[in-house]
């Protein structure tokens, strides 16, 4: 039934008069004659008949070496006819259609129909093979003979490598030096030449551009190309063939550079404009959301790398043009919500997808939470875009999944330091299962507890527990959304310290062998380090919490020092976790003087202008003063 509808629509489109003069370049198939038409000239030719696809004429151009006018900043009404480009895409020369299946458990949990499009089942476990192959298939003979090149550390690299191998085209893939071995070895296994260059992706891109010019190669872009967009758009064709059109309410797609959502929207909105297209990004990599809000492409200064497959600073020019016209809404999700989505997918498919691959499922959950009226009004389709998961990330995913699905709460509790307090505290949490409990003696009057426990409804259960604890003189706070608490403070339980002029910072640096040592060497300063916590989460970024004693007169010099560092840094001095649980008031002048004396190994003269009260304070305080850990480095 759907196939017949699509054929009818395509027939009407083919008969209509189109105000269209050009599209991306291609090498015609063997049955066609190459015509040296200028860029953006009209060159209508017959497309091959593809299985289950309507036939039609594709408007193509023959030069792919230089960008089309709509990609080089020149304003023009001449844009590609994506309906024809998508219907004539050649992706099925290398892959089969991927299934669209109902997520039974998730549908029951959300009380609506959730469908997942299994792009994790392609030959390279990602949708990227579609656009990469379609681009290569439409290169000229000369371009294929010269070879292709791409810069990528992820799924696009594997897509280009496999597509090139299938067509017997030489491929070069440039990847940063820090790329995990499992990724570049797989690209090499697929037959591509791997060039490891640069400390980050930007340096790798520069090398890629140099090799392109030097060797006369054709660069295969990951998203900002009409043929790549058209290849990704075949996902939209399949969805409309695999489920009744009038039952589909919304399609959710992850957004990085924008090629996937642009391709799907270009087709679906031509066939079924009533279907909503919703993009999903992370809260710390929201380039498309910001761009759509402002009406122009916005470049992010920094991006979160947990969902690395969608971590893009600047969306593509052509995907943005399409999204601005066709995308209905954007949803932003947290890393915890992504972890919860990975768990949801596993429960329905017994497959583990990568963080970027689970973005759309996280987006469905968030969207229905924000718009509960959408439940039960039709099927919501999530594109499961990839499954190239780094194994060492699974620990982090498992830790955060329940926080993300809001079935676990994480709280700090201050209780009286006396017998029976633990029992009273636990009695208020029971019968809920306690999943974490951290405590260490630090104060004769009060004890600090970090605890996690299962909840049925986070918004109801936690306030109830906090109120009940308060009745027994226990102060509790929900810190489930506090990143410092979740990543660091829960592992630093043990009491407050007497530290003068302490400022607290979160640093992030690329996680690679020796990265922590290089970070410490870069942090060699004359200011004292008073706190240090690091934990490898299996992420691409290492996270460190550092306390540094900075006297007020040194603020200007210290801030200048921070700007010179090559690491992302966030100051957390005023975070409630520090003010409530890490820092303790002290006698600053005496302590600071004693600390400096010990660091310099010089005697302290207590008669040098000190009052009698200060001498007494020093005699009481001195025996308990300890040298901070990192002053020994």
Image (cartoon, rainbow, N blue to C red):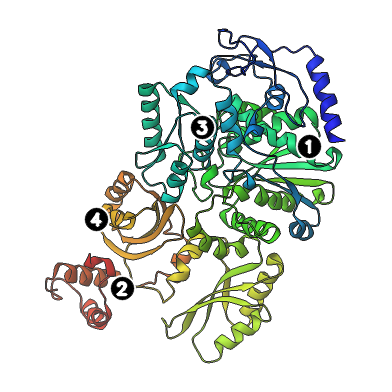
In the rendered structure, the answer to whether residue 520 lies left or right of residue 471 reads: left
Q: Residue at x 31, y 54 (%)?
A: 519
In the rendered structure, the answer to whether residue 113 lies left or right of residue 632 reads: right
- Nearer the observer, 371 or 519: 519
317, above or below 33, in the image: below
In this figure, which residue is indicated by the disc labeled 1?
240
Q: Residues within 10 Å of mark 3 (few under 14, many from 20)?
A: many
Q: In the rendered image, is residue 225 in sight?
A: no
In this figure, which residue is indicated by the disc labeled 2?
587
Q: Residue at x 41, y 56 (%)?
A: 542
115, above or below 402, in the image: above
Under tag 4, what secondary structure? loop
Residue 605: quadrant of the picture: bottom left
In space, the residues marked 4 and 1 are separated at their CA atoms by 59 Å
Under tag 2, what secondary structure? loop
In this figure, which residue is indicated by the disc labeled 3?
164
Precedes in sequence: disc 1 or disc 2: 1
Does the CB distance between marks 4 and 2 fall below 8 Å? no
Does the CB distance between marks 1 and 3 fall below 8 Å? no
Precedes in sequence: disc 3 or disc 2: 3
Give coordinates of residue 342: x percent, y percent: 62, 56
């Amino acid at each position: 039934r759907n196939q017949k509808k699509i054929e009818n629509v395509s027939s009407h489109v083919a008969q209509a008069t189109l105000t269209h003069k050009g599209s991306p370049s291609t090498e015609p198939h063997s049955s066609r004659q190459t015509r040296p038409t200028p860029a953006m000239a009209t060159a209508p030719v017959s497309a091959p008949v593809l299985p289950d696809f309507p036939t039609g004429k594709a408007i193509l151009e023959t030069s792919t070496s230089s960008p089309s006018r709509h990609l080089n900043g020149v304003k023009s009404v001449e844009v590609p006819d994506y309906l024809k480009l998508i219907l004539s895409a050649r992706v099925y020369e290398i892959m089969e259609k991927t299934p669209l299946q109902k997520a039974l458990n998730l549908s029951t949990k959300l009380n609506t129909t959730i469908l997942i499009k299994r792009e994790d089942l392609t030959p390279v476990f990602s949708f990227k093979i579609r656009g990469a192959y379609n681009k290569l298939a439409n290169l000229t003979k000369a371009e294929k003979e010269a070879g292709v090149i791409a810069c990528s550390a992820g799924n696009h690299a594997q897509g280009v490598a496999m597509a090139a191998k299938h067509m017997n085209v030489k491929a070069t893939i440039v990847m940063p030096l820090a790329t995990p071995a499992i990724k570049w070895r797989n690209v090499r296994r697929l037959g591509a030449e791997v060039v490891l260059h640069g400390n980050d992706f930007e340096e790798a891109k520069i090398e890629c551009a140099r090799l392109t010019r030097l060797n006369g190669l054709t660069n295969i872009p990951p998203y900002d190309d009409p043929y790549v967009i058209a290849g990704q758009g075949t996902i939209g064709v399949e969805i409309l063939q695999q489920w009744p059109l009038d039952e589909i309410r919304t399609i959710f797609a992850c957004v990085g550079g924008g090629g996937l959502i642009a391709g799907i929207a270009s087709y679906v909105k031509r066939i079924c404009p009533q279907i909503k297209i919703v993009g999903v990004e992370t809260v710390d990599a929201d380039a498309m959301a910001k761009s759509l809000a402002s009406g122009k492409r916005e470049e992010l200064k920094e991006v979160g790398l947990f969902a690395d497959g969608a971590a893009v600073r600047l969306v593509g020019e052509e995907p943005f043009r399409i999204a601005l016209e066709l995308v209905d809404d954007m949803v932003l999700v947290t890393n915890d919500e992504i972890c919860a989505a990975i768990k949801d997918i596993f429960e329905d498919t017994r497959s583990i997808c990568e963080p970027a691959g689970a973005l759309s499922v996280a987006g469905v959950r968030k969207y229905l939470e924000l718009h509960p009226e959408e439940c039960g009004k039709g099927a919501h389709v999530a594109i499961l875009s990839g499954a190239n998961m780094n194994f060492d990330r699974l620990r982090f995913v498992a830790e955060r999944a329940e926080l993300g699905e809001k079935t676990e709460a994480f709280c700090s509790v201050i209780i009286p330091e006396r017998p029976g307090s633990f029992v009273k505290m636990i009695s208020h949490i029971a019968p809920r299962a306690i999943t974490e409990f951290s405590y260490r003696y630090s104060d004769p009057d009060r004890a600090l507890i970090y605890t996690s426990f299962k909840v049925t409804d986070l918004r109801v259960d936690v306030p109830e527990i906090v109120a009940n604890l308060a009745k027994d003189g226990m102060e509790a706070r929900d810190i489930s959304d506090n990143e410092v608490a979740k990543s660091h403070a829960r592992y630093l339980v043990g009491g407050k310290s007497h530290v003068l002029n302490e400022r607290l910072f979160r640093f992030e640096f690329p996680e690679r062998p020796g990265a922590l040592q290089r970070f410490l060497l870069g942090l060699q300063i004359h200011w004292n380090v008073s706190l240090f916590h690091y934990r490898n989460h299996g992420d691409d970024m290492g996270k460190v919490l550092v306390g540094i004693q900075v006297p007020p007169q040194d603020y200007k010099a210290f801030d200048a020092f921070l700007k010179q560092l090559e690491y992302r840094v966030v100051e957390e001095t005023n975070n409630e976790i520090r003010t409530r649980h890490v820092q303790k008031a002290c006698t600053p002048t005496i302590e600071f003087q004693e600390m400096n004396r010990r660091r310099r190994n010089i005697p302290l003269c207590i008669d040098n202008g000190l009052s009698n009260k200060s001498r007494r304070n020093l005699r009481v305080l001195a025996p308990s003063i300890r040298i901070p850990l990192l002053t020994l480095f």
